Amino acid sequence: MSAKEETVLGTFDPGVSKVELLRRFRDGEHADMRDHGRAILSRPEFSPVTGLPMEQHRARALAQAKALAEKGLTTVSFPEGYGGSHDVGGSIAAFEMIAYGDLSTWVKCGVHFGLVRGAILYLGTEKHHERYLRGIATIELPGCIVMTEAGHGSNVQGLRTTATYDVATGEFVIDTPDPSATKDFIGNSARDGRIGIVFARLIVGDVDHGVHALAVELRDQHGQVTEGITIEDCGEKLGLNGVDNGRITFDRLRVPRDALLDRYAQVSPDGEYTSAIENPNQRFFTMIGILINGRVSITGAGIRASESALTIAVRYGLARRQFGRPGGEEELLLDYITHQRRLLPALAGSYALHFAQEALVAEFHRAFTEADYPEADRRRFETLAAGLKVAASWHAGATIQACRECCGGAGYIAANRFAALKADTDPFTTFEGDNTVLLQLVAKSLLTGYKDQFGELDPLGMVAFAAGQLYETLMERTAVRAFVGRVVDELATTIRDEDVDRLDRAYQLGLLRWREEHQTAALARRLKRGVDGGSDPYGVFTDCQDQAVILAKAHIDRVVLEAFDVAIARCEDEAVKDTLNRLCDLHALHTIERDRAWFLEHGRMSAPRAKAITRAVNRLCRQVREDAGMLVEAFGIPENLLGAPIAPAPS
Amino acid sequence: MSAKEETVLGTFDPGVSKVELLRRFRDGEHADMRDHGRAILSRPEFSPVTGLPMEQHRARALAQAKALAEKGLTTVSFPEGYGGSHDVGGSIAAFEMIAYGDLSTWVKCGVHFGLVRGAILYLGTEKHHERYLRGIATIELPGCIVMTEAGHGSNVQGLRTTATYDVATGEFVIDTPDPSATKDFIGNSARDGRIGIVFARLIVGDVDHGVHALAVELRDQHGQVTEGITIEDCGEKLGLNGVDNGRITFDRLRVPRDALLDRYAQVSPDGEYTSAIENPNQRFFTMIGILINGRVSITGAGIRASESALTIAVRYGLARRQFGRPGGEEELLLDYITHQRRLLPALAGSYALHFAQEALVAEFHRAFTEADYPEADRRRFETLAAGLKVAASWHAGATIQACRECCGGAGYIAANRFAALKADTDPFTTFEGDNTVLLQLVAKSLLTGYKDQFGELDPLGMVAFAAGQLYETLMERTAVRAFVGRVVDELATTIRDEDVDRLDRAYQLGLLRWREEHQTAALARRLKRGVDGGSDPYGVFTDCQDQAVILAKAHIDRVVLEAFDVAIARCEDEAVKDTLNRLCDLHALHTIERDRAWFLEHGRMSAPRAKAITRAVNRLCRQVREDAGMLVEAFGIPENLLGAPIAPAPS
């Protein structure tokens, strides 16, 4: 490993192998950070273990988090002066390397160094930074985000825990009004958490100002839980058992006035509430917005976990033989088209998402480092973060499952890693926003994205209004019609395979763009019709949820393919570029094939063309199979983290 | 529970509720056995527990297996005189009830009481029955199937362990020639197994007669492993950690001549090999065929596990509220179309598979109880068993995952059961035959099913030959053309929703039948073209694997829908029948919607029709939602087995 490592870390060398060129290209802007992460995680204490009892697993995750903090891998996004270099993008790259290891450690780090740090830094002010950030940087002061309630998961705006200002004592009184307001599934809280970022409705002088965040001491330095707080252990989970999730109730807990993280809203000693953001909705979404860190990080971890699974399954498929000609040698699993079909489009998908994530992380860096980051960009960025989180989490689940099945019985043995990969990535689909709820959010954002100004309308009214506007706009746009003309399919009775092979990226992108535009207009039309017919906006939008899901998915498919295409254009090595272009073709045509019913239904594809695309995907699978080994080795996953006995490093 | 139980067990009563009528109808022929199973499994010792260390879990599974044997639930398929009543069908029904509980117990019982009993009973002769069956019935003599090797999973015919006859001593010498012939993943072997059914190549006087089975003592009554045998523990697995899987190697182990299970092949003391089945292939498949028990049982367990998940998720969806009109009460999750779309077609699928399994079990009973069960029926039965195992295992995986996601964070807590349901059903897709390999088998069987006689051709040559025959036959069949005419779709530009609602079962079945016939002919044509072109049959079939998969899936879809339809026709209660018909419509149209690209590509459906079917599925979801609570309660899963705190019994 070490000799190999040196080559990778070395300077550019024309004699360097294609797999290493590809790895460097993939590593991109944060290559140094990724290599730094690889070097640290290559230490044997990070190698996977199986069968740890829960309490030992929790202790191990905390110990690993401390070790990573010591090596500086978890603190790069902290401000200078607090142990970091405010490298927001680099921080995500570092976290992605951690995600090749034990995902319990990754979650523990993500909650603490990502979300808790972010809340203190962006919702708090100088006094909070001074009080907490150093302890957070060393994880001497382990933290947790006390947001979700038993009765309110995805609907954060509906939280019911209260923080009532008592002007007599200058304190907030935090209280759990009833069992459904119990804080639930709170990561890092059952065993370790000392500082909790508590989200509660701020009540000042009988006025409910909506959900705000307060920094609350949950335990003292001896681990003693603060009086007025009860913490119950959520116990064993499907996975991530190194993370200590808990349930928290508050019984009229009194905290000082300066516990309020008061960057966006302040309460004066005599009980005057002030905020520079007048619209309560906008205030809420601004505060919640800082937690976007979590979504960006989950996207990265989902992609990395899918890469771990693919590396194991592809290596196994290139070594394992089964069945064959009577009397002859048995065939390699990866030479079967059925095997290729299960693994290679998934591999292409992981590459596509990698480059989409690269673009997202660059935008994330801008959003949190540029002082005058435009509001319109922020909205686009938030939509992208939500959409990619959905895509990466479902992709990870499906890919890991396919990889596990492609390894047969061996895939079921815990030492071969799929047990942990499957169980630990499972919550990605529902945490930091349930995927189905996030798809609605993406769709709403696409509709409202056409409006420049947020008015006084509530979000739902705004959606309906925007849909009306959008409908008019789209119907007038000649661009749409011109575009339709360009991708309209021949009514030929036969399509020769060569016709499909010659299809360029513009055709692939054109189809996906056309679908997104069409779905946007169709949804806008349905919303407009509903609202014009006198129905309330909530009911109308709810009725259209299935259309909204189709639109959101269409949007995500398009942005992911664009990101892959844009990244390839940057590649300067022709051989690497060819490989990536073939992989991108497979990704694009497989995406189109998967949803070809939609294109057929909407007259954008003829039946012969659809069949030809299926044949083209088969041919591309045969071609990509030749690169498969190189494509997984280019992930550069440290051997010790991979760990699976069925998938030793190729000799 | 007990009052409810009494009503269910009581005689037919016109005042009985619809849910109970539905349960009785579902319970069918083996209703008494199912109720017997429910009563036993309602005892608190069968309630799920989480977080058990592996060794405790293994001990618990064995203890549960013993308790179930004592109550007679696992021995009904044993012959009279050996503790049973030879009720083969009833036995599967009993095992299905066990599958509502801990699936480790179910696997342990399945391997031991199902497969080991079956091997002794059907591959052995009187002496083996006398020697082993009583100890197996009480599980005093725990057994395992020692078949799979590290190098050979799905390709059983390629096993390499040898059993060489030594004429000098009248013994077989069992040996593991190299590490890839190590027996691997052998359930019940690491801790408990005393009797092993060892599959090895039988070598008599230098002639390799192919794979045969021998009964071998692995451990003595004190648990001491026999000299010449090494058993290693496979350790922790993704799930089913109550089952002790092991790796076994044989070092020239000597066993007496009568260890050979000699019903289909005998070796005389002086080393003469005899068998009534001359063709070695046919002999192999006859011997392996008795293990079909496993596939039938997995199908049942997959369906039951999906029912457990659906009961939890539907109950949760009918209690949990999230989001809603501003100021109004929040909405029930199950009132959202996106939620309905995720759960209700899955619920319909579980019902459809239940009735298909009912038909399979009836055939299974015939196959193992009728002395003159026709060979053609056996082939059809084996195809059905393979196909339904594939369908049920993938259905279980997808359904449990959807249910888990529909319960959000709560679904991730182990106490809510999805952790175990997911992990424990995961191997269903690869054990007892990898699903993708089984689909090939189904397709081959459909091609060769047209031939009446097995000739001297090897299986692959036979497939190619049969494909040629079939091609001619199909091309001549006017029935196909007439049929095509009946389902050909209108070229209308609009399809009114009423047109789809009026579509009858004949239309739904017609589409699925047409697809199967078309795919059969298409595959036959491709095979014929390949073989005519001079390619070898193996290569030709391998190239067509993707088409074979489509054919096999089309076949399974058709037989499942037919089974559901046939079952409904038997229902005498009009209200129950209406409910089931609506559910069957949802299942049928959802199946067609899922694969509508195929129908569009093959000109069997117009684009407006396809869109109308999507709308119809939405409408059916709305309707079935009203019955959803009743439909899951009719599964009749004992409350203590369900166990999930988030899904208490409806009041």
Image (cartoon, coloured by chain):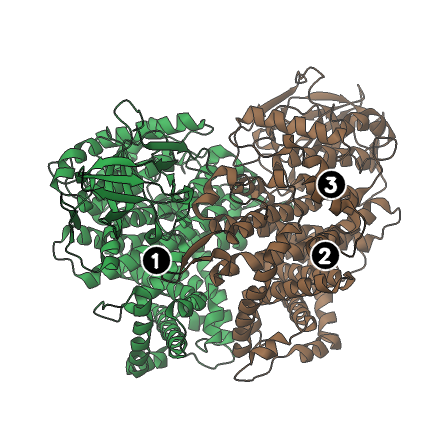
Chain colours: A brown, B green
The residue singled out by tag 3 in the image is A94
Q: Looking at the rendered structure, which numbered label has been put on residue B387?
A: 1
The residue singled out by tag 2 in the image is A462
B569, B627: nearer the viewer:
B569
The residue at the far front in this view is B168
Q: In the structure shown, which secondary structural element does the residue marked by tag 3 occupy?
A: helix
Q: Quadrant of residue A566?
A: bottom right
Q: Is residue A207 visible?
A: no
Mark 3 or mark 1, whichever is nearer to me = 3
Q: Quadrant of residue B166?
A: top left
- Whole-percent x and y of residue B159? 34, 49
- Whole-percent x and y of residue A63? 66, 26
Q: Is residue A65 visible?
A: yes
Chain letter for mark 3, please: A
Task: Classify A9 as above or below B375.
Answer: above
B175, A485: nearer the viewer:
B175
* Callout 3 amino acid: Ala
Quadrant location, the N terminus of chain B: top left
- Whole-percent x and y of residue A531? 64, 62
Does mark 2 fall on the same chain as mark 3? Answer: yes
Q: Left or right of A200: which side holds B368?
A: left
* Callout 1 amino acid: Gly
B6, A315: nearer the viewer:
A315
Q: In the structure shown, which secondary structural element does the residue marked by tag 1 occupy?
A: helix
Q: Which residue corresponds to the image point at 76% horizontal and 49% vertical from the top-left? A: A361
